[in-house]
Amino acid sequence: MSQSPASPIKVGIVGGTGYTGVELLRMLCQHPHVKLTSITSRTEDGMRVAEMFPSLRGRVDLAFSSPEKAELTSCDVVFFATPHGVAMAQAKTLLAAGVKVIDLAADFRLQDTKVFEQWYKIPHACPDVLAESVYGVVELNRASIAKARVVGNPGCYPTTVLLGLSPLFGGAPLIDLHDIVVDAKSGISGAGRKAEVSHLLAEAADNFKAYGVAGHRHKPEIQEQLDRMAGAPVGLTFIPHLLPMIRGMFSTIYANILPEALGVDYQKLFEDHYRGEAFVDVMPAGSMPETRSVRASNTLRIAIHRPGNGRKLIILVVQDNLVKGAAGQAIQNMNLMFGFPETAGLSHVAISP
Ligand SMILES: NC(=O)C1=CN([C@@H]2O[C@H](COP(=O)(O)OP(=O)(O)OC[C@H]3O[C@@H](n4cnc5c(N)ncnc54)[C@H](OP(=O)(O)O)[C@@H]3O)[C@@H](O)[C@H]2O)C=CC1
Ligand SMILES: CC(=O)N[C@@H](CCC(=O)OP(=O)(O)O)C(=O)O
């Protein structure tokens, strides 16, 4: 049962100057049960948050502090909006102090440490903490997240793919598991705020390209979860693309319906599966979702298509990579971990246009 404590919980953010960090700030400063107490940056130690982000003037009255100076052990929960490898170095200390941890990077996503080390090129610092962590797609793992001390917030692409496919698993076999194709596109904020030539306006604007075709680190993450959901190895092709826009993610998923499942009403199946979910919207039959319909909101929208009523099932999924794909989902996890209403602080309507 949801409960609201009399006093707000104390929240720290490691990596407050990045794109997902400032999204956490934007949403948490309006959260009814949260008090922001620590926000770190190695490079902006001492700078007022509102000086760097004028959108937060009058909302966040704090300065960035270096991670060493920040009093993270006095928080109730710490979000890591940092590169891979940072959260796992501090998780044990925080847990020992009774602090819950939500990592927006990949340290607590892949349960197989060999696969983690193959893709992230760093040894896992705390396999025991990894073993107790929960993969944070709320709509898939609600009960475990509510009891968790450590959550690995999913990658942005995996969220679209797993929520796009999840209604097809758990009952009688419906699709050919050997051949699922995901054609995914992300806005450039997905690459973070750090300077890189390929992210310059002159390089990324008025351009469109695929990347990671030979292999992308989100493929093993999706694979681990899909294999678990399907109860068998899934044949997955995953191709990410870079869109010439700032925010937004669009995944088109192609699956082949099994001959014995051609009579299923997939629109109804998806509607029934997600009925009552606050942040997953199954659009009416024939809809064409647009990224701007979810911009700055925690909503993920899905549309189901079946051209010619044939055997190809096409699932269109849109989300804001920085919100449902990162900071919003992390707050949804926090709400569950502390017994708050799942929607607390997350009621932002999309900005459109
Ligand atoms: N952008 C997106 O759409 C998504 C991002 N993610 C993941 O979330 C995490 C954050 O992403 P994003 O906000 O885009 O990244 P950014 O590059 O925009 O920001 C990274 C932040 O981490 C801080 N930081 C960097 N290195 C360290 C370190 N060693 N110790 C402590 N702080 C550090 C930086 O500040 P400073 O250098 O001043 O300390 C900065 O505030 C990443 O792991 C990313 O993969 C997940 C899903 C979607
Ligand atoms: C557009 C773009 O570059 N997107 C990033 C993925 C987004 C992300 O941050 O994912 P992780 O948390 O797993 O790093 C990429 O493809 O590397």
Image: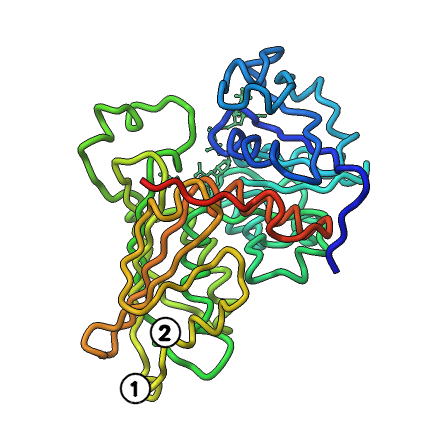
Q: Is residue 322 above or below residue 73?
A: below
Label 1 environment density (alpha carbons within 10 Å; few <14, some 14–19, many ≥20): few
**Quarter of image, ligand 2:** top left
Q: Label 2 is placed on what type of residue?
A: Gln
Label 2 environment density (alpha carbons within 10 Å; few <14, some 14–19, many ≥20): some
- Give the x, y percent position of residue 61: 64, 19
Looking at the image, which is closer to me, 32 or 325? Answer: 32
Q: Is residue 109 above or below residue 16?
A: below
| Residue positioned 31% across, 27% down in the render | 199
Q: State the residue position of label 2.
A: 267
Element under label 1? helix
Looking at the image, which is closer to me, 201 or 92? Answer: 201
Query: How many numbered markers are drawn?
Result: 2
Q: Is residue 234 above or below residue 21?
A: below
On screen, residue 13 versus residue 100, left or right, reads: left
Q: CA distance from mark 1 to mark 2?
A: 18 Å
On screen, residue 135 versus residue 191, left or right, reads: right
Q: Label 1 is placed on what type of residue?
A: Pro
- Give the x, y percent position of residue 71: 75, 24
| Residue positioned 49% across, 67% down in the render | 274
Q: State the residue position of label 1.
A: 259
On screen, residue 238 versus residue 162, left or right, reads: left
